Amino acid sequence: MAKHYENIIKTSLEEYIPVLSFRTVMPPQWEGSAGYSELPVAVTLKKKAASRLSFEVPWDGMIYGFVRSKFDIQKKLGMNEVPVSATLNDWEDRFMLVFDNGNPKEVKAFEVSTDDVIFLLENCRRTPEQRSVR
C-alpha cells in the first residue's frame, strides 16, 4: 500500500455516496453534464469486482457517475473548497475513496469495502445500457 495511505480511515461508502443520491452516466455524458450540486465520481473496477455485477462493465473497468450534494460532502469532509471530483479505485480486496478539491493539502481518502461499492452500483440509478442482465 502506498505510504501516504498507511493510516487510512475505514468508512462506509454510504456515509459519503448514498445509493439514493448516486446515478451513473455513459462516458460522453460525464464531461460537463453534472447538475449544480452534483459531484463527478469515477469508479475503476478490476475484473474480479466487475464480475460480481449483473451488468457488463467496459473493457477499461471504468464506470462514471454523479453524487448529490457536493456541498453536504464538503461540509462533512471539513474542506475549505467544494470538492471537484471523487474516485473509487479498486485495490483488489478493498476500494480507496478519494475526494479532491484541487488543493493537495485537503485531499481526503478513505478505505471502503468492495461489498459497499458493488451494492452502490447494483442499486443506484443506472443508465439503460447498464440495466441489462448478463
Image (cartoon, grey):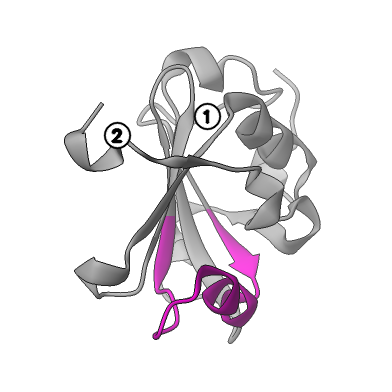
Q: Over which residues does the magenta segment extend?
A: 65-86
Which element is circle 2 on? loop
Q: Which residue is mark 2?
A: 6
The quadrant in which residue 67 appears is bottom right
Q: Is 72 colored magenta in this rendering? A: yes
Q: Residue at x 40, y 85 (%)?
A: 80
Quadrant the N terminus occupies: top left
Residue 54 horizontal/vertical position (percent): 71, 23
Q: Residue at x 39, y 85 (%)?
A: 81
Q: Please, what is the three-letter code of the amino acid marked with disc 1?
A: Val
Q: Which residue is mark 1?
A: 57
Q: Residue 127: in sight, yes or no?
A: no
Q: CA distance from mark 1 to mark 2?
A: 30 Å
Residue 119 horizontal/vertical position (percent): 73, 33
Q: Is residue 43 left or right of residue 117?
A: left
| Viewer-side label of 1, 2 | 2
Q: Please, what is the three-letter code of the amino acid marked with disc 2?
A: Glu
- In this rendered view, identify the residue nearer to me: 130 or 96: 96
Residue 117 horizontal/vertical position (percent): 61, 35
- In this rendered view, identify the residue nearer to me: 22 or 82: 82
Q: Residue at x 57, y 79 (%)?
A: 75
Answer whether labels 1 and 2 touch (C-beta < 8 Å): no
Vertical order, 112 against 94 (above or below): below
Label 2: how many Cα within 10 Å (few below 14, some 14–19, many 20+): few
Vertical order, 50 against 19 (above or below): above
Which element is circle 1 on? loop
Residue 89 horizontal/vertical position (percent): 40, 37
Q: Is residue 63 left or right of residue 37?
A: left
Q: Residue 115: in sight, yes or no?
A: yes
The quadrant in which residue 68 appears is bottom right
